[in-house]
């Protein structure tokens, strides 16, 4: 029973780190990546559809994204969705493709992004700590139903080690993203 609690906690912690990585991938770091468009949804025949399911997205160079919709009638809807998004990009349309030029980040914008990254990181750490608390509560319930106290303490120590491991991984991910953003 205690092993399943620890395994469940570890799986949830892994998902928390993966969620942070996905969130950070969609932040604009002055370099074009296709993941910038992952959160953008376009209304297509009455259904909200991700941009990456409406056409090919390519990177002709490090600062340009090129979207080639399979259905040319959806081009204006894609442009509107990009304009409404929080990316701060203005799409250019040449009739068959949509071009997004990623401008270089200003120092002020880089600082804002670093603050945002730290906020996301702190939220991820809080989520990891909440998972630890839930797992420890479950272990304490087992202790009340007959588990020896020293065994309970050992399981709680294992959960703490898991927590430390995932918090360190979050720190590593944040440092890498911060370095990427501060790179000129």
Image (cartoon, grey):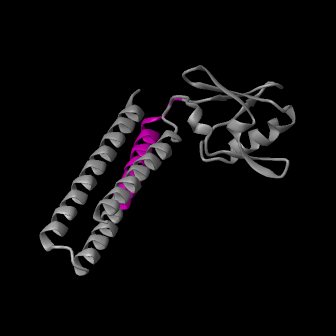
Q: Quadrant of the C terminus?
A: top left
Name the residue at 21% across, 64% down: 156
Q: Left or right of 110: which side holds 72?
A: right
Q: Is residue 144 above or below residue 108?
A: below
Question: Does residue 13 show up magenta in the picture?
Answer: no
Q: Residue furthest bottom?
A: 144
Name the residue at 55% across, 29% down: 32
Name the residue at 35% across, 59% down: 9
Q: Left or right of 101: which side holds 8?
A: left
Name the residue at 42% across, 36% down: 107
Q: Quadrant of residue 142?
A: bottom left
What is the x, y in percent for residue 76? 81, 39
Q: Quadrant of the N terminus?
A: bottom left
Residue situated in front as seen by the camera: 156 or 144: 144
Residue situated in front as seen by the camera: 61 or 148: 148
Q: Quadrant of residue 73?
A: top right
Q: Which residues are magenta?
A: 104-127
Q: Is residue 60 above or below residue 147?
A: above
Q: Residue furthest left?
A: 150
Residue situated in front as seen by the camera: 65 or 171: 171
Q: Left or right of 160: which side holds 120?
A: right
Residue situated in front as seen by the camera: 150 or 77: 150
Q: Is residue 89 above or below residue 39?
A: above
Main secondary structure along the magenta-highlighted residues: helix
């Amino acid at each position: 029973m205690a092993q399943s609690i620890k395994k469940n906690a570890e799986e949830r912690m892994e998902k928390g780190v993966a969620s942070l990585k996905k969130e950070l991938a969609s932040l604009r770091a002055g370099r074009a990546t296709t993941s910038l468009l992952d959160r953008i949804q376009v209304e297509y025949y009455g259904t909200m559809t991700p941009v990456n399911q409406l056409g090919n997205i390519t990177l002709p160079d490090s600062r340009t994204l090129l979207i080639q919709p399979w259905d040319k009638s959806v081009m204006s809807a894609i442009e509107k969705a990009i304009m409404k998004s929080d990316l701060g990009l203005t799409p250019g349309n040449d009739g068959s493709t949509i071009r997004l030029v990623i401008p270089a980040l200003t120092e002020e914008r880089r600082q804002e992004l670093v603050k945002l990254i730290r906020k996301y990181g702190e939220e991820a750490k809080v989520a990891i700590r909440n998972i630890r608390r839930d797992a420890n509560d479950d272990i304490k319930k087992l202790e009340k139903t007959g588990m020896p106290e020293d065994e309970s303490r050992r399981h709680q120590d294992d959960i703490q080690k898991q927590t430390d491991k995932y918090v360190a991984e979050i720190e590593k991910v944040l440092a890498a993203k911060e370095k990427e953003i501060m790179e000129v």
